[in-house]
Image: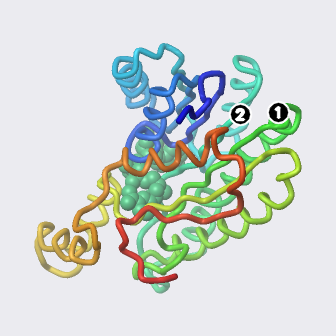
Amino acid sequence: MDLQLKDKIVLVTASSKGLGKATALEFAKEGATVLVSSRTEETLARTVEEIKQLTNNERVYAKTCDMSSVEDINALFAWIKTEFGGVDILVNNTGGPTAGGFKDLADEDWMTAFEKNLLSYVRTTRAVLPHMQENDFGRIINISSSSTKEVIDGLILSNTFRSGMVGLTKSLAREYAKHNILVNTIGPGRIATDRVAELDRLAASRQSISIEDVIKRSENLIPIGRYGQPEEFAKVVLFIASPANTYMTGQSLIIDGGMLKAL
Ligand SMILES: NC(=O)c1ccc[n+]([C@@H]2O[C@H](COP(=O)([O-])OP(=O)(O)OC[C@H]3O[C@@H](n4cnc5c(N)ncnc54)[C@H](OP(=O)(O)O)[C@@H]3O)[C@@H](O)[C@H]2O)c1
């Protein structure tokens, strides 16, 4: 299937590692112009070089941006406007919120997670919509978590703000469908990245068991029997975010190897 991405400009935020990087790589393989961003300049520069080498696509560009910072997001979009005019496809991603249960968190943690994990997506979306409306084309993917369907114990900030993301996605999808702007949420179950390794380390220390045992227990909950790989997640994102998807909008999908029992 031709995903029709060759003339598209794609922004993937929080993309120097993990799911964001894998998604940027898949877009670059399809010949899109790919813009990557995250907080750390050196990691980003390495990511750009790696993607270029693996794909022979030279149209990969980077700018640092902390998704918690409105100034950084404004600067990112000022750069995009000057250099590229706008983006056709936005993949919203950001770092995971602080782990913890209700008693572990103060107002400051809640405010930080709100700004990083929900308001950041509102801000980037606001920035891309005018160009998308002008072109009568746009695709927005909001990367979330399986916590949107089944809460994860010890991740109350994710459970709270990612559900907000699903509401945001549905409302945007309905408001902007007439402009051919399709908006969907895609959440990972357990995909092998640094974030999941960190959460496994925390679980091992909390339960006083080895990391290997934590992983074995998690894998036992996944019918496919293993963690996913970032590229398995990215390939799904690619289709839903591409012009080849012409009718799916407002949905919240989970890529989890069958892990969730929720309907
Ligand atoms: N992997 C999974 O199975 C899984 C499951 C559920 C939810 N998620 C969620 O999916 C998202 C991506 O996770 P991942 O597994 O790919 O994580 P990861 O491997 O740790 O990668 C995170 C990426 O985000 C960047 N980043 C972190 N904080 C940022 C910020 N404030 N602003 C901009 N960029 C930031 C990091 O680069 P810098 O550090 O250089 O900024 C890095 O490129 C997270 O929100 C995570 O909670 C993942």
The residue nearer to you, when weighing 104 against 198, is 198
Q: Where is residue 155 in the image (x, y as percent from the top left)?
A: 44, 75
Q: Residue 88 carries which label?
A: 2
Q: Nearer the viewer, residue 242 or 198?
A: 242
Q: Which mark is residue 131?
A: 1
Q: Position of residue 93 (x, y in %)?
A: 55, 49
Which residue type carries mark 1? Answer: His
The disc at residue 254 is: none
Q: In this view, does 152 lie to the left or right of 117?
A: left
Mark 2 or mark 1, which is nearer the start of the sequence?
Answer: 2
Q: In which quarter of the image is residue 131?
A: top right
| Label 1: element kind | helix
Q: What residue type is labelled 2?
A: Asp
- Please tell me which residue is depicted at 47% across the width and 43% down the height of the picture: 20
Picture residue at 35% right of the left edge, 56% below the top: 195
**Is 27 drawn above or below residue 126 in the view shown?**
above
Report the residue at 62% width, 50% height from top.
Answer: 141
